[in-house]
Amino acid sequence: EAQVTQNPRYLITVTGKKLTVTCSQNMNHEYMSWYRQDPGLGLRQIYYSMNVEVTDKGDVPEGYKVSRKEKRNFPLILESPSPNQTSLYFCASSPNPLNYGYTFGSGTRLTVV
Amino acid sequence: DQQVKQNSPSLSVQEGRISILNCDYTNSMFDYFLWYKKYPAEGPTFLISISSIKDKNEDGRFTVFLNKSAKHLSLHIVPSQPGDSAVYFCGAGSYQLTFGKGTKLSVIP
């Protein structure tokens, strides 16, 4: 089944403890992206990647890192999480997000206490 | 400053009628405009897109209209069905995509 898989689905962590949210897609898509969804703010893009080793900042990249060493994987790294990074995170992939849109994963709900 | 605005947080429509969801943007450099639908506890689902060189794109019950002079786009759903009840996000830009805050559509049977 063609899909975008994020792990974990739920995570509670403490301020300052480094964490990684993994994202993997099995559709051989060039483009991948991370979004966060917050009440009253909608979806905001964190980072996106147009291919292996090519990444760029979205609207809200502060406090996040990404890497694209392989086409299928696009992990999101929070080096020192803070409570304002408590959010619902979505990973997405696409062959071309402008014409075909993104296929989104099911989301990771992160709570930083 | 919010570059993509969906000014109606919610909309209720009778089943079978037309649903019109609106979106305004401020950046005239945006190349593409997209609509996504989102159900609770799921990721967003791509519905339809339109490039800035067009003013209309249709896909089944969904039609997107783009008015570049007014920096306005709208999504028409005809006829509306109860399964269309969801939050709809308008997105604009290029590979860096900016979304509005969403409009919750409720289709009443």
Image (tube, coloured by chain):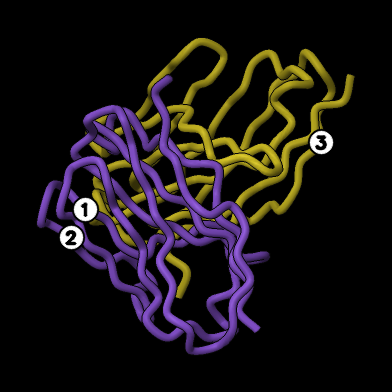
Chain colours: A purple, B yellow
Q: What's the CA distance linking mark 2 and mark 3? A: 40 Å
Lateral position of residue A73 relative to residue B99, left or right = left
Chain under disc 1: A
* Disc 3: which residue: B12
The amino acid beneath tag 2 is Thr
Q: Quadrant of residue B67?
A: top left
Q: Nearer the viewer, residue A60 or B29?
A: A60
Image point 45% across, 40% down: which residue?
A104
* Disc 1: which residue: A49
Q: What's the CA distance linking mark 2 and mark 1? A: 4 Å
Lateral position of residue B87 relative to residue B14, left or right = left
Image point 36% across, 34% down: which residue?
A101
Q: Give yes or no for contact between labels 2 and 1 (Cβ–Cβ under 8 Å).
A: yes
Q: From what the image shows, is residue B18 above or below residue A113?
A: above
Residue A74, given in percent of the width and then of the height, sits at: 29, 53
Image point 33% across, 58% down: which residue?
A75
| Residue closest to the far right | B109
Q: Are the residues under badges 3 and 1 in a single subunit?
A: no
